[in-house]
Image: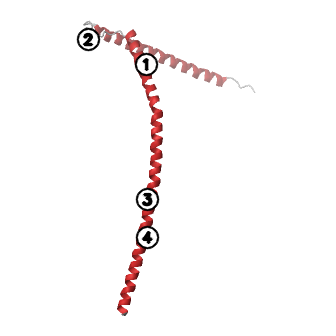
Amino acid sequence: MGKHLQTMQETHAKSNLQYLERELLYVKQFHLQEKYSENSGRLSNLMAEVRDQQAALTPEEKRLDRWKERLRKSKDDAHNCTADESKDVSKKPPPNYGILFDQIEARTVEDLEAHIDAIAKDLKNDEKLDERSGEDQQKLPKKE
C-alpha cells in the first residue's frame, strides 16, 4: 500500500507538472494569437495607407508623363529647326572634309597655346610688380 501511495504521489506530481506545462502552452498560444491579431490589424492599416498613397501618386505620374511628352516634342522641334546634319544617310561628306577639320583644330591648338603663354608672361610681370611695390612700401618711413 505504501508503494501504491508513493507511485500515486509521483503520478500526481507528474500530472501537476503536465498541467502547469499545458497552462504555459495555453498562455503562449494566447499571446501568439494576440500578437497575430495586432500585426494583422497593423498590416491592413499599412496596406490601406499604401493604396491611398498609390492613388495619390497616379495623377502625379500622369502629369509627369504629359510633361515628359511636351519636353520630348519641344526637343524634337528644336532639333528639327537647328539641325544641320542630313537625315539622309546615303550622303557622305566631301573627301577633304576631315583633313580641313584637322587643320582647323591644329591651328586652334596653336593659337590657344600662344594665348596661354602670353597670359603666363602677363602674370609673371604682375607678380614682379607686386613684389617691387611691396619692397617700395617697406622702404617708406612709417607715419605715426
Which residue is drawn at the image coordinates 41% and 72% (left, top)? 21
Mark 1 crowdedness (10 Å alpha carbons): few <14, some 14-19, many ≥20: few
Question: Real-space Cα distance between discs 4 and 3?
Answer: 15 Å
The mark lying in front, picked from 1 and 3, is 3
Q: Are marks 1 and 2 in contact (CB under 8 Å)?
A: no
Residue 52: percent from the left, percent from the top? 47, 38
Residue at label 2? 89
Residue at label 4? 23
- The secondary element bearing badge 1 is classed as helix
Q: What's the amino acid at mark 4? A: Glu
Mark 4 crowdedness (10 Å alpha carbons): few <14, some 14-19, many ≥20: few
Q: What's the amino acid at mark 3? A: Gln
**Mark 1 or mark 2: whose residue is earlier in sequence:** 1
Residue 114: percent from the left, percent from the top? 42, 13
**Mark 4 or mark 3: whose residue is earlier in sequence:** 4
Which residue is drawn at the image coordinates 61% and 23% (left, top)? 134
**Residue 16 quadrant:** bottom left
Q: Are marks 2 and 4 in contact (CB under 8 Å)?
A: no
Residue at label 1? 70
**Mark 1 or mark 3: whose residue is earlier in sequence:** 3
**Mark 2 or mark 4: whose residue is earlier in sequence:** 4
**Mark 4 or mark 1: whose residue is earlier in sequence:** 4
Question: Real-space Cα distance between discs 2 and 3?
Answer: 72 Å
Question: Real-space Cα distance between discs 2 and 4?
Answer: 86 Å
Residue at label 3? 33
Q: What's the amino acid at mark 1? A: Arg
